[in-house]
Image (cartoon, coloured by chain):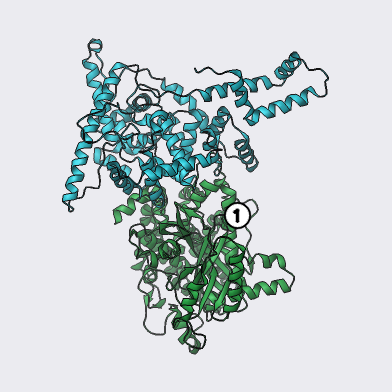
Chain colours: A green, B cyan
Amino acid sequence: MLIISIRLQQDYSSNLKFKTSFRNCILEAFKRRLWKETEGDDWDIMWAEKEWIHEVLDHTHLQSNQKINHFRNHYELTRKDLMIKNFKRYKKNLEREGKSEEANNYNFFPLTFHLPSEYPIFFEEFKRQSANSDTKTAWIMKPIGKSQGKGIFIFNKIQQISQWKNTLRYNQDNPQAEAYIVQKYIADPLLIGGKKFDMRIYLLCTSYQPLTLYLYRTGFARFTHHRYDSEDISNTYVHLTNVAIQKTSDNYDEKLGGKWNLQTLKLYLMTKYGQEKVAETFYNIQMLMIRSLQAVQKIIINDKHCFELYGFDILLDAQLKPWLLEVNASPSMTSNTPVDFELKCGLLDDVFTIIDLEKVLTGNEEQIGGFDLICKGNPIKLPINSTFTTYLGAFNNRQQQLKKIAKSTAIRLAQTYSEGQMKAIEVGSKGQKEKEEKDKQMRSSSKGPQAMQNGSNVNNKSNNLTKQNTIMKRNTTNLPALGTMQNKSNVKRQPLQNAGQQQQIQQSQSNSSKKNNPNEDSMLSANQKLQKLTQESKINQFQPYKQQSQYNEVMGMGGGSRNLQKNEE
Amino acid sequence: MQQFDNQEILMKLKSSKQFWDIKKKLKQGLGDQQKIGVNDIQKLAQSCEIEDQLIKLISHILKKSKKRETLKEDQIEFLNTSKIKWTELLFKNLDIVHQKTKNQEEDDTNTDSKLYIYDEKNLLAFLQTFKQQQQSNALYQNVQFQSNKLLNINIPLKSSQSILDKYQYLLLQEELQDDKINKIRKQIENEHLDIELEKIAQTFVPNGERCLLYLKYFEFDHQETVLQQNFAKLQKECLNQLFYDELLEIDGHEISEDTFYFVFQEQILTCLKCFIRDRTIKENIRIQLQNGVKKEHAEFQLPVTGFFPFKNISKYVAPLCYLSTKIHIIYALFKEFFCRYFCFLHAISSENNSILSLCMQIEEIVSTRSPKLFHHLKVIGCDTLKLIIHQLVYCFIGDMDPPHILTIYDQIIGHDSLEILVILCVGFLNKYKPKLLLAKNQENVQQIFSELREDRFQELVQFAYKQ
């Protein structure tokens, strides 16, 4: 991708402008797209900090083309206390409507109380829990406004909290009292290598009406650096997986960052628990995320300018039941390893593709890059013959997939164009030229070149196409073929494949229509240029082995990636 | 064989589930006959294969009660003397290593993290010395033996064709349907016979059931508390520091650089520390690795296991961490795997499984089936064996993803043999053959393998049989 875009830079530069105060992967991802940075208000896309939204957005009028990375009242989902409040309320409503089955599904958050307001109820519950069980139930206190694990502590005696109560931090009359939530601590988390971990999973919401959600295939598991010990509740290193906390630990290994990507985690779980159990778990995680957003769907103010990338923190307990810990509105886009860096840049790049500033997509794409559409109005069900229940943690084939999308988009645009031409020839009206202009503009102002370049080259590479397809079929974690069921499900996503079959005919059609029209010189030459470019870059592009390994590198999969990681450091 | 009285056999029979199944079947078959004679039972048993099952069961029980003796002396005298030499060599290495650690303590700036007693290259180099020795032997002087092979020792070898034939069925493995997998699952749960478990391991072990299968095969399935207690005891002993602990810790660093295993570094280290303190290994291990000569003036003795920990010993533990979250189970599996199989990878012996035989098998197959490659590698000074010795000795751990490694483990159990490694090594060479043929020198070869690559079990098997 990068190679192509660099090559294109000479002939083509985008008119799109971005604005952001971040100086990490976000900036890099913008730059890779060759968009221009702006300080003023003429941005097309802004990656803002949450505070900016609260302070500025309400007083600003946005142009119709402008996109921004938060919804106005995202905190209804992303602030710990409001989230729980909304879940509880939604659950109650469902019960009232008699949908008790669906209501029972809202069991993915631990018992939670808001402090100080719900202190009396909490105290009752605390007493009840302690009386019922021999072992002391542990509770976790989290300050509402803070992130990265700051201010969190665990306790199992009420004295520990009354001490806290008496300190300045908590005083019911004091308006500045810091609000906390207190949650029943999940005491039997799944341990890997004796260590606790949680998962960070990315979900993109582009609209709340209808609820449109894309789930990213790759996420990661963050490990604590110390052995888990349910007795020792004062040592935060043991219990909190936040990178920000773990960094301060003596054991912290910079190189590894204590992370596994989701594919490795899935591989581990699959080896240990078997296919079905893991498929079920990952499906539950996906449903958990959809349900979380459904619960706040009516509360969040929908806005066509807004999109939001959420970072879900999910914990698995020893029974592989997923628990939602928290939803982050601005998940960290700072990376600590090269692999991590590529993951985040790829993720952001796909976000930019989905929000479609260039206006080239149909909006019906089921997979864009590493994102899979999981909800559009209603949760999307995968075909019955598919072995997957969710693509979460499956092999992330984003680069191949992006090429596929680029191709089908190019074909579609070419088709609309040729249809326009045909009409124009028939009618021969004056308005035709205007339309032509428009089309031209649309093509050249879009990310289209990248797309078209692949499309226009279809004939040349039909041989390579089959090769590419075989790579694409490789999915998820590659278990040994001895009886594994993994490779079965390459039949999905019918529409795109059909498009692939039709493309040759369509392409020749569009080519011939172009040749018929002598006014098309400029267009043709642009196409030729692009074709030339692709031919040059073809050598780089179509080496399946190399591609595959680049892939593995990004995904941190396969044996080689380890070597590479070493080299890069 | 040890003598059993009938009473004992009957006791053991009664403890197995299959015995009761057979009895139930007999009862059903005889129905409500009033008088049952011995002849009736015999007839019925013969007619519905019950007899066969019973015989199998009894022979299984007898086999189990027979304890495998640790192989100490090899039938070839020459190898016995070599083993003594090898042990002496290692003692020397130990002294050097010890000296180095001492120096390091004094001088912190010069920390050499690659401290070990021996690694796979040392082992191969040692095996290589055999050639010259044997050729100088009067017996062989008459025969003008011109061979390109690195190892050329006169030990009884299986024909390489028989090995190839043995594993050929792997080529025909098909993807299994869900219902079949479930059937296998049930089978593993109910099966207790070694032979049957081996059959399952040969064909297909579903993920998630592997741990149970291994535990059953090693007869640990009802002994979890025993395993736990034993492990706890060993852990207590770990409080006394040993010099070898330091070496193990250094060894663990390498595993910590592996994406798949870094999470388990701590567990692996704990397992190994317990391992070198485990006194039961000496009697359980199937082959004696180093000659137990006691050097009186040496500062250090062999660990109680009877052999030195070597470089990358952690690798053998790592994939097992994917089987259980319980450390005592990981330990028990590791111990069993090492004592039964992996020990042969470090044994100077003429046994079929020993590193010597495996190496010679590989050379044999490659030199006959891909003579061009074999010759080319020889010419560029990078012999076939030198190329794959790492993969061979460490069972491809670190070269393949954990599930693939565990498939290798399945095959090892399934055939009670390490020969699958021969197939995989041959396949590995075949896979990279086109690239290797282009290599002009050793650096080229190294470059090929330092590139990103992804090897898979099934793929290598297929390459092995490619002509």
Q: In the depicted view, which residue is nearer to us: A287 or A81?
A: A81
Q: In the depicted view, which residue is nearer to us: A460 or B364?
A: B364
Decide: is A465 above or below B440.
below
> Residue at the spot x=67%, y=19% of the render?
B51
- Identity, as a three-letter code, of the amino acid under mark 1: Glu
Q: Quadrant of residue A126?
A: bottom right
Q: Quadrant of the C terminus of chain B?
A: top left
Q: Is residue B207 visible?
A: yes
Q: Which residue is mark 1?
A: A280
Q: Position of residue A561 (x, y in %)?
A: 37, 51
Label 1 chain ID: A
Q: Is residue B319 visible?
A: no
Decide: is A121 above or below A252.
below
Decide: is A451 above or below B398.
below
Q: In the depicted view, which residue is nearer to us: B27 or A532?
A: B27
Q: Is residue B380 left or right of residue A339?
A: left
> Residue at the spot x=24%, y=37% of the render?
B441
Q: Secondary structure at mark 1?
A: helix
Q: Position of residue B412 (x, y in %)?
A: 46, 32
Q: Quadrant of residue B331?
A: top left
> Residue at the spot x=26%, y=20% of the render?
B81
Q: Position of residue A40 (x, y in %)?
A: 38, 85
Mark 1: few/some/many CA within 10 Å (<14, 14-19, 20+): some
Q: Quadrant of residue B312?
A: top left
Q: Position of residue A280 (x, y in %)?
A: 60, 54
Q: Is residue B143 left or right of residue A109?
A: left
